[in-house]
Structure formats: C-alpha cells, structure tokens
C-alpha cells in the first residue's frame, strides 16, 4: 500500500512536467512557423514526450494551439481581474507593466496574434484565437474601461472605447511593429527600453486620459 501511494504521489508531477513541456515547445514552434507546418509529432519530439500525451491533455492539434494561447495570456488576464476588483486606477498601469514583462518572455507572441487576426474568419487559427479572446479578454476590457469612466477616472469628454483603443495601441505596438521600422527609428526592444517606454506611457495616460487621483478623491 505504501509503495502504491508513493507512485500515485509522484505521478502528477511527471504529468505536469510533460504538459508544460508540450505547451512550451508548441509556443516556440507556433510563433515562428505557420500553423499548418507545425505537426503534433514535431511538438512531442521537441518536448521529449510521447505523442499520445498531446491527445491525453489537449485532444488534438487545435486543442494544443488553443491551450497555448490561453495559458500564454493567462498572467495578463489575472492582472486584468485584479484591475476589475479594485477601484484604484493605478492597477491599469500594473496591467500594462505585466503585459510588457510577460510578452518580453515571448516577444513574437503578439505578432502571432496580429498575423492570425489578419487571416480569413474561416481559418482554424483565427477561429480558435477569437474564441480565446471572446472568453478571456474582451469582456474584461469592456468592463475595465467603463468602470474607469463610472468612477470618474477618465477626463471629461474621454470616450471609454477610444481610451481602450489608445491603451491597446500603446501596449501592443512595440511588439507588433515591423522590426525594420523599429530599426529605422533606432529602437531595440530590450528590457531597459521597455521599462522606459512603460514609464513614458504611464505619463501619457496620466496627463492625457486620466483625472489626477487627488481630483477624484476630492469629488
């Protein structure tokens, strides 16, 4: 009985490692190769895992791709949930900060999203991407910006939808801009540069779209 219990205790760790390896290797492949060029066998071989594990955890290639998208953006979504749970607009800056830091780990991931969303609606990748964003991203975004407006954090006359577009532009553009364009302007996406850009964007938001915190409290 004790030996059987030991085997049961050790097994989940091995399973978790296999699953994480599959997701990590899938992410590496999907961001540099077209969807149709990535095979489940290639992912499994790169992960050093039996291909049957893909079927076990994700069902098929579509499930693997969708789960990879979901779990890559999960830390960002968790921060968004914190923003929604708080009445402090500074969490909006924390949201931008965590996005920058998570995407620096996989800088090609935002470009993958952009490329997929330019594909016809019938393409598998776009259908899966839209499903993820409908489930995880869009509802929270909409609530966040309308909540900022209701709490009086947006300057008078600022439209919440346009504020969302501006915020997305400031957050996403460094990662989706063509590398050649960045080079023309002498920009290299390093950790130091993104930290400086983050502080710059926070100042833009603070002085352009958001009411100073003291003004909100006085009201």
Image (spheres, helix red, strand yellow):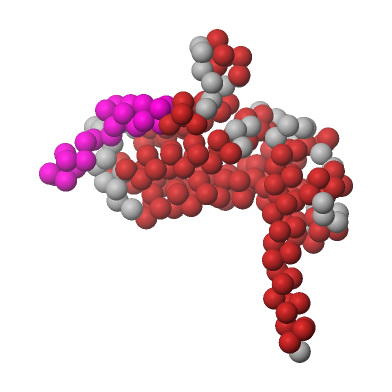
Residue in the picture at 60% in, 19% down:
178
> Which one is nearer the viewer's eye here, 7 or 150?
7
Residue closest to the far top = 184
Using residue 14 as the reference point, say whether residue 74 is left or right of it.
left
Q: Position of residue 29 (x, y in %)?
A: 75, 38
Residue drawn at point x = 16 percent, y = 39 percent = 215
Q: Position of residue 159 (x, y in %)?
A: 34, 32
Judged left or right of residue 206, residue 131 is right
Quadrant where the C terminus is found in the figure: top left
Percent position of residue 113, x then y: 63, 34
Membership of 207 in magenta stretch: yes
* Image-based side of 103 in relation to 69, left or right: left
User: Residue 162: x percent and y percent?
Assistant: 40, 30
In magenta segment, residue 160: no
Residue at the limit of the structure toward the left, as seen here: 218
- In the image shown, does 100 or 70 lie closer to the viewer? 100
Q: Which residue is drawn at 63% across and 42% down?
A: 130
**Residue 172, relative to residue 18: is it above or below?**
above
Query: Main SS of the magenta segment?
Result: helix
Magenta residues? 196-219
Write down the quadrant of residue 112 in the picture: top right
Q: In this view, does 162 lie above or below 133?
A: above
The residue lying at 27 percent from left, 28 percent from top is 207
Q: Pick the quarter of the image with the N terminus.
A: bottom right
């Amino acid at each position: 009985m004790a030996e059987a219990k030991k085997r049961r205790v050790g097994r989940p760790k091995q399973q978790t490692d296999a699953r994480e390896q599959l997701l990590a290797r899938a992410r590496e492949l999907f961001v540099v190769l077209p969807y149709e060029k990535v095979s489940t066998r290639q992912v499994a071989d790169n992960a050093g895992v039996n291909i049957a594990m893909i079927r076990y955890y994700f069902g098929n290639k579509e499930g693997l791709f969708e789960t990879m998208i979901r779990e890559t953006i999960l830390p960002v979504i968790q921060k968004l949930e914190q923003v929604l749970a708080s009445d402090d607009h500074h969490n909006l800056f924390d949201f931008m900060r965590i996005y920058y830091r998570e995407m620096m780990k996989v800088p090609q991931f935002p470009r993958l999203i952009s490329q997929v969303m330019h594909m016809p609606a019938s393409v598998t990748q776009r259908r899966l991407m839209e499903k993820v964003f409908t489930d995880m991203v869009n509802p929270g975004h909409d609530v966040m910006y309308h909540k900022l407006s209701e709490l009086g954090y947006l300057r008078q006359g600022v439209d919440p939808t346009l504020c969302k577009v501006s915020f997305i532009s400031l957050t996403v553009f460094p990662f989706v801009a063509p590398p050649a364009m960045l080079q023309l302007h002498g920009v290299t996406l390093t950790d130091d540069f993104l930290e400086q850009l983050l502080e710059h964007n926070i100042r833009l938001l603070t002085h352009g779209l958001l009411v100073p915190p003291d003004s909100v409290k006085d009201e």
